[in-house]
Image (cartoon, rainbow, N blue to C red):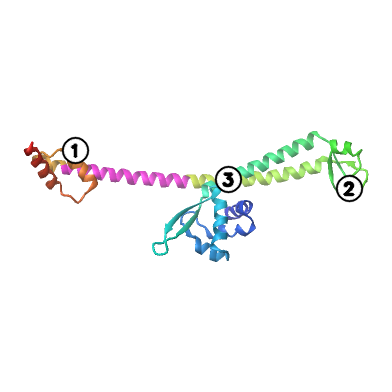
Amino acid sequence: MLQKFLKEIVTLIAGKQAEEIVDLLDGTKYVNEFIIAKKLNLTINQTRNILYKISDQGLVSFIRKKDKRKGWYTYFWKIEILKSLEFLRNSILKKMEQINYQIKSRETKEFYVCPNCNIEFSEESALIHSFTCNECGNIVSRKDNSSSIKEYNKELDKLKKELEFVDAELKIEREKLEKVKVRVAKKEEKLNQKEKERKKLERKKNAPAKASKKTSSKSHVKKAKKSPAKISKKSKVSKKHK
Ligand SMILES: [Zn+2]
């Protein structure tokens, strides 16, 4: 279902030939643009043009890598699921707004229709044409709005269901991202903890040498290989010179 919606969006943005890109892109891995072009049976420039259009809306993102021998860049593309869902959500809301406006106008205004051509006229335009059809000259008749209101409500229900689906997908996607964030934060915390313990140990080791804390910890961060013993010797020497 999500795939179907994504195809709709991509078609809207970049045309029908872009539709298949949705099947070729991934939400987590970056895909080489040459593979995309080959599978779409398009040139690399055509493929890039499509992807640029979609990326203008933030629905795909890329990284690029330079080919050291040939000197050119290859782009790798990924679909941005969260952004795409947000885009989808907005377009559904816009459609709903338009339909609500239509329903309201059907409920409050008169409409006329030509029985011959089935063309619809607002009250104002029917008045201007003296209640005749500007295509065939037939006399137009007042329209029963209830059937079109019914149709609009049906469409509205469909959109509401789509919105529910998108909201559910958004929730899943946001939770996923949140989990990743927590995982990264935990990892960082663990690393920090290890680093702290290591520094503590180091300080203990260096304590008899009375190395300046600043020098040892600083150089430790930059070059972990450098033995702290050497550094403390150095600082001792420099102290002597003073
Ligand atoms: Zn007509």
Residue that lies at the very extreme toward the left in this rendered image = 240
Q: Amino acid at mark 1?
A: Lys
Callout 2 crowding tier (Cα within 10 Å): few <14, some 14–19, many ≥20: few
Q: Residue at x 60, y 55 (%)?
A: 7
Q: Does the residue tagged 2 have its C-beta within 8 Å of any atom of ligand 1?
A: yes
Q: Earlier in the sequence, mark 2 or mark 1?
A: 2
- Percent x, y of residue 186: 34, 44
Q: Residue at x 75, y 38 (%)?
A: 103
- Residue 240: which quarter of the image? top left
- Percent x, y of residue 219: 20, 44
Q: Amino acid at mark 2?
A: Glu
- Residue 148: which quarter of the image? top right
C-alpha span from label 2 to label 3:
40 Å
Element class at badge 1: helix
Q: Is residue 120 left or right of residue 206?
A: right
Highlighted range, magenta? 175-202
Give the label on residue 214, or none: 1
Nearer to me, 220 or 97 = 220
Q: Residue at x 39, y 62 (%)?
A: 68
Nearer to me, 215 or 208 = 215
C-alpha span from label 2 to label 1:
89 Å
Camera-nearest label, 2 or 3 = 2
